[in-house]
Image (cartoon, grey):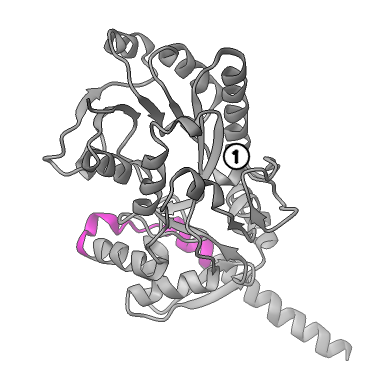
Amino acid sequence: MLMKALFIGGTGTISTDITKLCVEKGWSITLLNRGKQNGRLPANIPVTQWTLDINDENAVRTHLEGEHFDVIANFINFSVDQIERDIRLFSGKTNQYIFISSASAYQKPLSHFCITESTPLSNPHWAYSRAKIECEERLMAEYRQNGFPITIVRPSHTYDNYKIPLCIHGEHGSWQTIKRMMEGKPVLVPGDGNTLWTLTHSRDFAKGFEGLMGNIHAIGESIHITSDESLTWNQIYQSVGRAFNLTPILFHVATDFIVACEPSYAGPLHGDKSVTVAFDNSKIKRFVPGFVAETRFDQGVRISAEYFLSHPETQMEDPAFDHFIETIIRVQNMAIVQARKEISEFG
């Protein structure tokens, strides 16, 4: 008998490759979403589609009548209210409920650079991460009190063929930075670019995730899934440049200065990407024997670059972010000139 899974979402950066892999592995997959990104899936992929808004509880409850799933995974939960809704909807409807949390929930600043699942959860810099922590705590309470069969999965910085991961970008993604590289203009790198970061391709993440689905040992557990590869941000930007056959000009600016100029970057930088992190993946390898992230970043980003270059619709310019970069660089250079002047005059 086929194992059945219901994915809320199922066509995003993380979940598209999970959906593809599960179908290849023989799962019967039902997608519950509004159908806006289903074009990411091959046209012939055999999935059942429920075109619904998960927030329409009555409509979802109607579709759930007479249904039971081995796994239900929600890829688009970001608040405790949404968790409460899912507990109401899915209690008694599944053998395993998977919540996608975030590795950004781990302690900031870290007391030890190497993160395990026992690393404390605390992020004073980013409301997004604190909300994920609250979701985890509510689900753990429901598991302990009522046996709701949860598994918590914490992705770190995961990318796919449609995304090029960078430390900082504007509202329209990475293209503006790529465009600046192509034009020979400097690109902004927070800090000195030597903090370590971990990037995971969604194909690799999918292998670990599928291995947790229906896995009785994963009930009640929290597990992160990442690559074992650690890169500095300088290496990441250089790899991105090489993927486009160019050498980027990196301009380093203190994270504190960037955040002081634009406070909205406090969470993504102080609360995440400006902190050196490396992950101990022993737990996912114990739960999913044979799991290994095989895609090196320099290889994965070349595929992303090819996609961007062959799909003009991904090349979204961002004048506001470009102005931000130009302003930061200009002001920083002015400060350097002024400081040198004043120092020499004093001497």
The image quadrant that residue 90 belongs to is top left
Residue 144 within the magenta-colored segment of the rendering: no
Question: In what quadrant of the picture does the C terminus appear?
Answer: bottom right
Q: Which residue is mark 1?
A: 129
- Residue found at the very far left of the displayed protein: 44
Query: Could you tell me which residue is drawn at 45 percent across and 13 percent down?
Result: 91
Residue 221's place in the image compared with 106, above or below, is above
Residue 134's place in the image compared with 299, above or below, is above
Closer to the camera, 233 or 6? 6
The image quadrant that residue 334 belongs to is bottom right
In the displayed structure image, the side of residue 266 where residue 50 appears, left or right: left
Q: Main secondary structure of the magenta part?
A: helix
Q: Which residues are magenta?
A: 310-325
Query: Could you tell me which residue is drawn at 45 percent across and 18 percent down?
Result: 86
In the displayed structure image, the side of residue 130 where residue 324 appears, left or right: left
The number of numbered discs placed on residues in the rendered structure image is 1
